[in-house]
Image: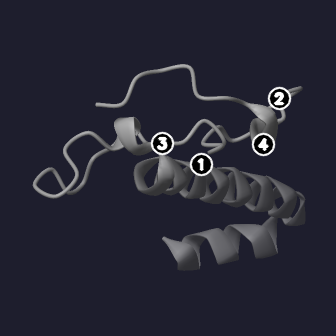
């Protein structure tokens, strides 16, 4: 398949940007899915030692990818300990 892409790019050079953007989009989507699977508190890979990882988050932990106007260092704890 890779050989076919290279031969098509040699025959039609206008396809090269298409291959670059499709590859970058696929790579970005794969990296974002991997980030969600590894660092999101809603995902629990180790249910024996840490069955509820969302309860161990401090209010100052930022787990969102992008926070618009929130300063996580100034947040106070407003929930009970379990």
Task: Give the number of the disc on residue 57.
Answer: 3
Q: Residue at x 56, y 20 (%)?
A: 78
> Viewer-proximal residue, 38 or 34?
38
Q: Residue 28's spot in the image, x, y percent?
A: 66, 54
Mark 2, residue position: 70
Q: Residue at x 58, y 50 (%)?
A: 32
Asked if labels 1 and 4 touch by Cβ distance under 8 angstroms, the answer is no
Secondary structure under tag 2 reads loop
Secondary structure under tag 1 reads helix
10 Å crowding of disc 1: few (<14), some (14-19), many (20+): few
Mark closer to the chain start, 4 or 3: 3
Mark 4, residue position: 73
Asked if labels 3 and 2 touch by Cβ distance under 8 angstroms, the answer is no
Between marks 4 and 1, how big is the CA–CA gap?
A: 29 Å
Between marks 4 and 3, how big is the CA–CA gap?
A: 13 Å
> Which quadrant would residue 58 be assigned to in this image?
top right
């Amino acid at each position: 398949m890779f050989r076919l892409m290279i031969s098509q790019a040699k025959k039609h050079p206008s396809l090269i940007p298409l291959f670059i953007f499709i590859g970058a989009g696929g790579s970005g989507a794969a990296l974002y899915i991997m980030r969600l699977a590894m660092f999101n508190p809603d995902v629990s890979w180790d249910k024996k030692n840490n069955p509820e990882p969302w309860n161990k988050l401090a209010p100052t932990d930022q787990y969102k990818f992008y926070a618009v106007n929130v300063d996580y260092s100034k947040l106070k704890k407003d929930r009970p300990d379990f």
